[in-house]
Image: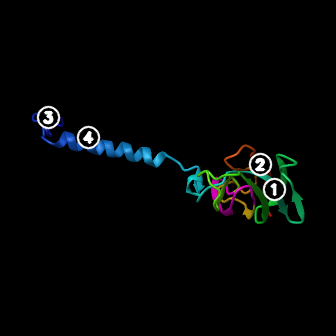
Protein backbone atom coordinates (compact mmCIF):
# COMPACT_ATOMS: atom_id res chain seq x y z
CA UNK A 1 0.00 0.00 0.00
CA UNK A 2 1.05 3.56 -0.61
CA UNK A 3 1.53 5.79 2.40
CA UNK A 4 0.85 9.50 2.76
CA UNK A 5 3.61 12.12 2.47
CA UNK A 6 4.72 11.60 6.09
CA UNK A 7 4.85 7.81 5.68
CA UNK A 8 2.60 7.17 8.66
CA UNK A 9 -0.83 6.14 7.36
CA UNK A 10 -1.87 4.04 4.38
CA UNK A 11 -4.06 5.82 1.82
CA UNK A 12 -7.02 3.54 0.98
CA UNK A 13 -7.61 2.83 -2.73
CA UNK A 14 -4.32 4.35 -3.89
CA UNK A 15 -2.62 0.96 -4.12
CA UNK A 16 -5.24 -0.30 -6.53
CA UNK A 17 -5.04 2.90 -8.59
CA UNK A 18 -1.24 2.62 -8.79
CA UNK A 19 -1.50 -1.03 -9.82
CA UNK A 20 -4.01 -0.22 -12.57
CA UNK A 21 -1.84 2.66 -13.82
CA UNK A 22 1.30 0.50 -13.95
CA UNK A 23 -0.59 -2.30 -15.72
CA UNK A 24 -1.87 0.10 -18.38
CA UNK A 25 1.63 1.53 -18.83
CA UNK A 26 3.21 -1.90 -19.36
CA UNK A 27 0.41 -2.99 -21.69
CA UNK A 28 0.76 0.14 -23.83
CA UNK A 29 4.53 -0.33 -24.07
CA UNK A 30 4.00 -3.88 -25.28
CA UNK A 31 1.52 -2.74 -27.92
CA UNK A 32 3.71 0.09 -29.21
CA UNK A 33 6.77 -2.12 -29.67
CA UNK A 34 5.06 -4.71 -31.86
CA UNK A 35 5.53 -4.26 -35.60
CA UNK A 36 3.48 -5.26 -38.61
CA UNK A 37 5.43 -7.31 -41.13
CA UNK A 38 2.56 -8.18 -43.43
CA UNK A 39 -0.26 -6.26 -45.03
CA UNK A 40 -2.99 -6.80 -47.54
CA UNK A 41 -5.39 -9.69 -47.46
CA UNK A 42 -4.95 -12.85 -45.43
CA UNK A 43 -5.74 -16.09 -47.30
CA UNK A 44 -8.77 -16.61 -45.05
CA UNK A 45 -10.36 -13.40 -46.41
CA UNK A 46 -10.58 -14.79 -49.96
CA UNK A 47 -14.01 -15.96 -51.07
CA UNK A 48 -14.13 -19.74 -51.70
CA UNK A 49 -10.31 -19.79 -51.98
CA UNK A 50 -8.57 -21.99 -54.53
CA UNK A 51 -4.97 -22.69 -53.65
CA UNK A 52 -2.59 -22.92 -56.54
CA UNK A 53 0.98 -22.95 -57.79
CA UNK A 54 2.73 -20.19 -59.72
CA UNK A 55 3.46 -21.97 -63.01
CA UNK A 56 4.73 -19.07 -65.15
CA UNK A 57 6.23 -15.64 -64.50
CA UNK A 58 7.67 -12.94 -66.75
CA UNK A 59 9.24 -9.70 -65.57
CA UNK A 60 9.42 -6.85 -68.06
CA UNK A 61 12.01 -4.15 -67.39
CA UNK A 62 12.08 -1.63 -70.22
CA UNK A 63 12.52 -3.75 -73.35
CA UNK A 64 14.01 -6.76 -71.53
CA UNK A 65 12.10 -9.79 -70.29
CA UNK A 66 13.24 -12.03 -67.43
CA UNK A 67 11.95 -15.46 -66.42
CA UNK A 68 12.67 -16.11 -62.71
CA UNK A 69 11.24 -19.63 -62.88
CA UNK A 70 13.70 -20.75 -65.55
CA UNK A 71 16.46 -18.60 -63.99
CA UNK A 72 15.91 -18.54 -60.19
CA UNK A 73 17.41 -15.62 -58.27
CA UNK A 74 17.80 -13.54 -61.44
CA UNK A 75 19.21 -10.07 -60.75
CA UNK A 76 18.38 -7.02 -62.84
CA UNK A 77 19.26 -3.35 -62.43
CA UNK A 78 16.65 -0.61 -62.41
CA UNK A 79 16.62 3.11 -61.69
CA UNK A 80 14.67 3.87 -58.53
CA UNK A 81 12.39 6.28 -60.40
CA UNK A 82 11.26 3.59 -62.86
CA UNK A 83 8.80 0.71 -62.65
CA UNK A 84 8.67 -2.85 -63.93
CA UNK A 85 5.83 -5.23 -64.79
CA UNK A 86 5.31 -8.73 -63.43
CA UNK A 87 2.92 -11.12 -65.18
CA UNK A 88 2.37 -14.54 -63.65
CA UNK A 89 -0.02 -17.47 -63.76
CA UNK A 90 -1.44 -19.36 -60.80
CA UNK A 91 -2.76 -22.84 -61.63
CA UNK A 92 -5.53 -23.69 -59.17
CA UNK A 93 -6.38 -27.01 -57.55
CA UNK A 94 -9.39 -29.18 -58.48
CA UNK A 95 -11.36 -28.10 -55.39
CA UNK A 96 -11.51 -24.96 -53.30
CA UNK A 97 -10.55 -24.83 -49.64
CA UNK A 98 -14.30 -25.24 -49.02
CA UNK A 99 -14.25 -28.58 -50.94
CA UNK A 100 -16.38 -27.39 -53.86
CA UNK A 101 -15.96 -26.26 -57.47
CA UNK A 102 -17.92 -23.01 -57.31
CA UNK A 103 -16.36 -19.73 -58.50
CA UNK A 104 -14.01 -18.09 -56.04
CA UNK A 105 -10.65 -16.41 -55.49
CA UNK A 106 -7.04 -17.49 -55.47
CA UNK A 107 -4.33 -15.92 -53.29
CA UNK A 108 -0.69 -14.89 -53.56
CA UNK A 109 1.83 -13.07 -51.41
CA UNK A 110 4.78 -10.91 -52.46
CA UNK A 111 7.57 -8.92 -50.84
CA UNK A 112 7.87 -6.56 -53.84
CA UNK A 113 6.45 -3.49 -52.02
CA UNK A 114 9.14 -3.81 -49.32
CA UNK A 115 6.93 -5.85 -46.96
CA UNK A 116 4.81 -8.99 -47.32
CA UNK A 117 1.60 -8.16 -49.19
CA UNK A 118 -1.15 -10.75 -49.60
CA UNK A 119 -3.76 -10.41 -52.35
CA UNK A 120 -6.96 -12.25 -53.22
CA UNK A 121 -7.56 -12.54 -56.98
CA UNK A 122 -11.15 -12.93 -58.16
CA UNK A 123 -12.24 -15.14 -61.03
CA UNK A 124 -10.69 -18.42 -59.90
CA UNK A 125 -12.26 -21.79 -60.37
CA UNK A 126 -11.43 -25.48 -60.39
CA UNK A 127 -8.24 -26.46 -62.27
CA UNK A 128 -7.80 -23.06 -63.95
CA UNK A 129 -4.93 -20.81 -64.96
CA UNK A 130 -5.43 -17.38 -63.38
CA UNK A 131 -3.30 -14.63 -64.95
CA UNK A 132 -2.16 -11.69 -62.84
CA UNK A 133 -0.31 -8.57 -64.04
CA UNK A 134 1.04 -5.95 -61.64
CA UNK A 135 3.32 -2.94 -61.98
CA UNK A 136 5.93 -2.56 -59.26
CA UNK A 137 8.04 0.43 -58.20
CA UNK A 138 10.88 1.15 -55.79
CA UNK A 139 9.59 0.63 -52.24
CA UNK A 140 9.66 3.77 -50.12
CA UNK A 141 10.80 1.84 -47.05
CA UNK A 142 14.16 0.71 -48.46
CA UNK A 143 17.35 2.60 -49.33
CA UNK A 144 17.43 4.38 -52.72
CA UNK A 145 20.45 2.32 -53.83
CA UNK A 146 20.27 -1.26 -52.63
CA UNK A 147 19.66 -4.82 -53.72
CA UNK A 148 16.12 -5.92 -52.96
CA UNK A 149 15.33 -9.64 -52.68
CA UNK A 150 11.79 -10.20 -53.94
CA UNK A 151 9.63 -13.29 -53.46
CA UNK A 152 6.24 -14.35 -54.80
CA UNK A 153 4.39 -17.29 -53.31
CA UNK A 154 1.07 -19.00 -52.80
CA UNK A 155 0.03 -21.46 -50.11
CA UNK A 156 1.46 -24.28 -52.25
CA UNK A 157 5.19 -25.10 -52.43
CA UNK A 158 7.32 -23.28 -55.00
CA UNK A 159 8.33 -19.71 -54.10
CA UNK A 160 9.63 -17.58 -56.98
CA UNK A 161 12.50 -15.20 -56.19
CA UNK A 162 14.55 -12.55 -57.95
CA UNK A 163 16.74 -9.57 -57.04
CA UNK A 164 16.60 -5.94 -58.08
CA UNK A 165 19.65 -3.72 -57.93
CA UNK A 166 18.05 -0.31 -57.43
CA UNK A 167 20.21 2.63 -58.56
CA UNK A 168 19.84 6.41 -58.52
CA UNK A 169 18.91 8.13 -61.82
**Location of residue 16 by image quarter:** top left
Distance, label 2 to label 4, CA atoms, is 51 Å
How far apart marks 1 and 4 lie (CA) works out to 57 Å
Location of mark 4 (residue):
19
Q: Mark 3 or mark 4: which comes first in sequence?
A: 3
Q: Mark 2 points at which residue?
A: 160
Depth check, mark 2 against mark 4: the one in front is: 2
Residue drawn at 84 percent across, 56 percent down: 77
Horizontally, is 17 left or right of 30 in the view?
A: left
Q: Is mark 1 on a helix, strand or loop?
A: strand
Residue 141: x %, y % from top left: 64, 56
100 or 113, which lies in front? 100
Residue at label 3? 7
Residue 168 visible to the viewer: no
Q: Is residue 12 visible?
A: yes
Q: Which mark is residue 57?
A: 1
Asked if labels 2 and 1 touch by Cβ distance under 8 angstroms, the answer is yes
- Front label number (2 vs 3): 2
Lower position in the chain sequence, tag 2 or tag 3:
3
Q: Give the range drawn in magenta.
A: 113-129
Amino acid sequence: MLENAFGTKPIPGKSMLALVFISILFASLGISTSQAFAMGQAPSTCSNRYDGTITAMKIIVGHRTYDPITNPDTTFQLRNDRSYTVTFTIHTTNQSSQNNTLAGDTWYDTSSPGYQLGECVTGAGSNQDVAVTVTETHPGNIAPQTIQNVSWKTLMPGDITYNIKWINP
